[in-house]
Amino acid sequence: MAQSLEQKFVFTGRDFLDLDDYTSEELRYLLDLAIDLKKKQKAGEVYHPLKGKTLGMIFEKSSTRTRVSFEVGMYQLGGHALFLSRNDLQIGRGEPISDTAQVLARYLDGIMIRTFAHTTLTDLAKYANIPVINALTDWSHPCQAMADYQTVLEEKGRLEGLKIAFVGDGNNMAHSLMMGAAKFGMTCAIASPEGYWPADEMTKKSQEVASQTGGHILVTADPKEAIADADIVYTDVWASMGMEEEQKIREKAFAAYQVNEELVRYAKPDYMFLHCLPAHRGEEVSAGVIDGRNSRIFDEAENRLHAQKAIMAAIM
Ligand code: CP
Ligand code: NVA
């Protein structure tokens, strides 16, 4: 599969900064590759396309899933991963990202970064002449969205024509899910309180993409409208990393947006519940829903590993 893929698409050396940098066909190829690599791993097949290669992993925010899945993923692909926290790097003491990028590119074969401002990611990519992967910024979380759509594809057998409802903050997760839905020809309905909607720029870009793929993007303040007949119901924390001081204000603003038993009655009976995690039970989601029979959160978390292995194998 890897060979036929390479004949059709050119991935080598590219960054993975956002889903809009890739065509629908390329993204779909990466999902199929992820499913293929997952099968290989489960069958105990050794696959080492990244033998001798090193990924640097820069973290300016906390992480459980991202750190472990990238590190294990590199190992399984025959390579090595280096954990670089902000406090241990000179960027924490003011070394410019441009210098950091050019230095790291002399040692490494790829860099993964989790940071605050999206411009830190794009600056790193601009100055590092090796592939750079977005492992979450305040703007987007494309690796998570790839794992999410892999999880949906595995269960539903298709993506096109399905409806995903995202109820909660119009944040980085909402942005990447919306663009992914547009790329895959899906309907994406985001319900957030006014003032917490996704950025207009992202909504417009996703709507443009959707108009080419048969998808549909909708933003509303009404959670029932968003969730009506949804195949996938998604939520995320109300206060993302870096917004901790807004927690109390946000709890009030989002009180009517909890995904609970009452709300999911409007979704399709066989809906899948997804959450990127970490979750706050009793806030954005009730325990009954996140721990209930429609929840696929641990398959979703596992797929971070497989989806990112596909991305790394393709671009590195
Ligand atoms: N979903 C996600 O990115 O989890 P971590 O913050 O634990 O990496
Ligand atoms: N929106 C959340 C996602 C965490 C994986 C955050 O940025 O904190």
Image (spheres, grey):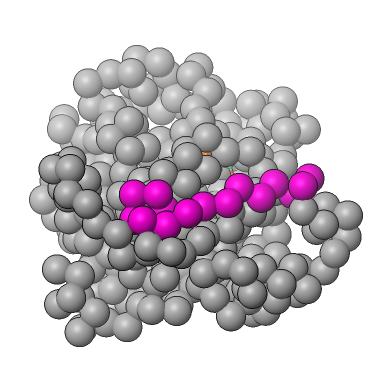
Residue at image coords 85%, 64%: 95
x then y, percent, for residue 197: 56, 51
Q: Which residue is nearer to you in this view: 15 or 50?
A: 50
Q: Viewed as shown, does residue 295 lie left or right of 137?
A: left
x then y, percent, for residue 24: 28, 72
Identity of the residue drawn at 72% across and 42% down? 242
**Please, which residue is most extreme toward the front here?**
52
The image quarter containing residue 291 is top left
Q: Tell me: residue 1, above or below residue 151.
A: below
Residue placed furthest toward the right: 93
In the image, taking residue 210 as reference, residue 19 lies left or right, namely: right
Query: Which residue occupies the foreground of this view, 265 or 311?
Result: 311
Q: Position of residue 13 (x, y in %)?
A: 45, 79
Residue at (28% x, 35% y) in the render: 299
Residue 89 visible to an observer of this rendering: yes
Instruction: State the extent of the magenta-drawn residues as a range.
Output: 74-88
Q: Residue 82: horizontal and vertical position, in percent?
A: 58, 51
Q: State whether residue 310 is above or below residue 126.
A: above
Could you tell whether 14 is left or right of 213 in the image?
right
Please report the residue visible at 70 percent of the width from the left and 65 percent of the height from the top. Answer: 120
- When the figure is inspected, residue 73 is found, relative to residue 181, above or below; the finding is above
> From the image, which quarter does the C terminus lie in?
bottom left
Give the image quadrant in which the ligand numbered 2 is located.
Answer: top right
Q: Is residue 205 visible?
A: no
Q: Nearer the viewer, residue 304 or 180?
A: 304
